[in-house]
């Protein structure tokens, strides 16, 4: 066990200087107790409700023998209990661990073992898979089960019974502080998931703190709460799963600004139901992840333009929106605000999309602590044509949990003693200082010595009126080493030829970037959070059939 937990500052959970996530919730709840905090299906929690139930979770965990610094895994779909359990674990001084509900037994075994999870809060149906591998998890000693109408017989304490018993407990809560650990497991595009360790104050500053441009950072939790109490209450519909950074960070940032977080609790993505939910709850902001969510939602709204009268903003992160998606939203409502942010689990939120660009790639205006680095960790100057890796310095993670080797690789120290968080993304720096996002190094295609960044080709393919979605991957090639291969799904009623799609690409891309192979599928598969499923696409690209004839 190589946890890099830093001891708390000693500020109690109600102290004004407490910038722990638990302390921030308590402060906002004290300032706006009756304001609606969470809408999740039929459940509606005020800030006072959420704060009180988090305290009950904390007392239950402490009474069950969970000690400060130990890890509590959370395995459930989007629901109010996810937030209650996370805040409860933080309040108990423990560390919640996000678990992907799509994982099969082998993946769950790896993550829970790697995270040294001693407790699990899970929906009953999902806990059944963990029960089958429990003998391989000797540290896991306590299970709390959330009822989901599943008939599965699993050993554990019922969630609501646990909270009811905790209401009679007088167990004191430990002090919390901004040095307490925030742990986020991220799968990335390749390899096993890794636990990114942050100080809670740092993740608040770089991903969760909401403030207007020019407004100074809040000095303490009291200042955060005062701003939240003064702010006009907003409602954000969070479509991303809380088990991933995008959904989790948006939900938490809304709570810390005194807004209402509306969770999409459906287990499948239905544009029709999402529009109905946004309309019914008068959502002003919809959070999505890239085109996979943004495009079908815009298309659904175009079919029912009178819906969602309160909706003013669509916010995306995790993967850039294409110009096609932006045009669809503005076709629905010309004055809609489209926010597209850039960031990652290892870097926090780094910047927002700028107006600069050529329509093929995304440009982002980055914060002062963000740079594009060359191979010697030196920031590239504006206007440089050199490609480098996007990185952040200053408030960055402590490292990866249980992985000193990858920690040293991802968080190196430069010649001047500055420590960097190196993202997996490559980019260039434009003359105005904005960063052109090219794509992830783990998916870059090396074809005949030329590097191709898949996201650039995907954006061009998706701008064709006959293409509904696309993923670009490398396929083996005897002569070139790798060739550019596209997996696409088509708009119903459209079937562009291979030659037509290639001609469309050649207008906007260099010849070596044009897909040599195009395979058509009924639906392009994406991850639970809406990102490209490159592993699946690579398998499809290697199949001998289903290529469009040229």
Image (spheres, helix red, strand yellow):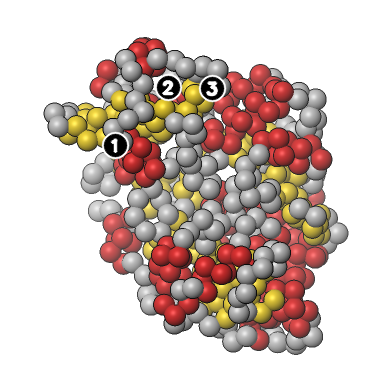
- Disc 1 or 3, which lies upstream in sequence? 3
Residue at left offset 45%, top offset 56%: 186
Question: Toward which corner of the image does residue 237 lie, by quadrant?
Answer: top right
For the residue pair 364 and 115, the one nearer the viewer reads as 115
Percent from the top left, x then y, of residue 128? Answer: 56, 69
Percent from the top left, x then y, of residue 9? Answer: 56, 75
Depth check, mark 3 against mark 2: the one in front is 3
Q: SS at mark 1?
A: loop
Which residue was labeled with disc 1? 542
Q: SS at mark 3?
A: loop
- The disc label shown at residue 460, or none: 2
- Disc 2 or 1, which lies upstream in sequence? 2
Q: Are marks 1 and 3 in contact (CB under 8 Å)?
A: no
Relative height, residue 85 to residue 461 (above, below): below
Q: SS at mark 2?
A: helix
Percent from the top left, x then y, of residue 471? Answer: 41, 33
Relative side of 182 to 163, left or right: left
Measured Cα–Cα span from mark 2 to mark 1: 22 Å
Measured Cα–Cα span from mark 1 to mark 3: 23 Å
For the residue pair 407 and 10, the one nearer the viewer reads as 407
How packed mark 2 is, by other alpha carbons closer than 10 Å (few <14, some 14-19, many 20 or more), is: many
Which residue was labeled with disc 3? 491
């Amino acid at each position: 066990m190589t946890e890099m937990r830093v001891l708390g500052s000693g500020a109690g959970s109600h102290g004004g200087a407490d910038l722990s996530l638990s302390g921030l919730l308590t402060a906002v709840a004290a300032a706006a107790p009756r304001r609606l905090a969470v809408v999740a299906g039929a459940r509606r929690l005020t800030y006072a409700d959420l704060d009180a139930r988090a305290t009950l979770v904390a007392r239950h965990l402490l009474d069950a023998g969970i000690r400060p610094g130990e890890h509590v895994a959370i395995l459930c779909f989007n629901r109010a209990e996810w937030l209650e359990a996370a805040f409860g674990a933080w309040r108990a001084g423990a560390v919640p661990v996000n678990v992907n509900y799509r994982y099969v037994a082998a993946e769950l075994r790896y993550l829970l073992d790697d995270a040294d999870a001693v407790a699990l809060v899970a929906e009953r149906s999902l806990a059944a898979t963990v029960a089958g591998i429990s003998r391989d998890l000797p540290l896991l000693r306590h299970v709390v089960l959330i009822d989901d109408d599943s008939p599965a017989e699993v050993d554990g304490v019922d969630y609501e019974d646990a909270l009811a018993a905790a209401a009679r407990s007088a167990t004191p809560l430990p002090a919390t502080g901004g040095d307490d650990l925030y742990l986020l497991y991220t799968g990335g595009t390749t390899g096993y998931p890794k636990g990114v360790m942050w100080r809670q104050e740092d993740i608040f500053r770089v991903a969760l703190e909401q403030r207007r441009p020019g407004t100074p950072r809040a000095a303490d939790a009291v200042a955060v709460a005062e701003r939240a109490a003064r702010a006009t209450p907003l409602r954000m519909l969070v479509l991303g799963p809380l088990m991933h950074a995008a959904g989790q960070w948006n939900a938490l940032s809304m709570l810390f600004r005194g807004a209402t977080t509306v969770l999409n609790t459906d287990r499948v993505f239905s544009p029709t139901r999402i529009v109905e939910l946004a309309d019914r709850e008068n959502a002003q902001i919809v959070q999505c992840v890239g085109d996979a969510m943004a495009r079908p939602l815009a298309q659904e709204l175009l079919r029912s333009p009178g819906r969602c009268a309160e909706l003013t903003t669509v916010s995306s992160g995790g993967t850039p929106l294409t110009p096609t998606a932006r045009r669809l939203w503005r076709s629905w409502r010309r004055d809609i605000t489209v926010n597209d942010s850039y960031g990652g689990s290892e870097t926090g939120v780094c910047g927002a999309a700028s107006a600069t660009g050529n329509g093929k790639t995304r440009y982002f205006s980055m914060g002062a602590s963000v740079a594009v680095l060359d191979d010697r960790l030196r920031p590239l100057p504006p206007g440089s044509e050199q490609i480098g890796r996007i990185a952040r310095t200053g408030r960055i993670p402590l490292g990866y949990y249980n992985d000193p080797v990858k920690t040293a690789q991802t968080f190196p120290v430069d010649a001047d003693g500055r420590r960097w968080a190196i993202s997996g993304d490559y980019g260039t720096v434009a003359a105005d200082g904005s960063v052109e996002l090219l794509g992830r190094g783990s998916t870059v295609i090396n074809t005949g010595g030329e590097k191709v960044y898949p996201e650039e080709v995907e954006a061009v393919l998706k701008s064709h009126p006959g293409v509904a979605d696309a993923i670009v991957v490398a396929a083996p090639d005897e002569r070139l080493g790798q060739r550019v291969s596209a997996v696409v799904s088509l708009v119903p009623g459209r079937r562009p030829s291979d030659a037509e799609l290639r001609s469309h690409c050649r207008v906007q891309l260099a010849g070596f970037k044009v897909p040599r192979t195009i395979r058509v599928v009924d639906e392009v598969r994406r991850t639970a959070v809406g990102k490209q499923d490159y592993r699946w696409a690579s398998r499809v690209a290697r199949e001998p059939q289903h290529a469009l004839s040229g």
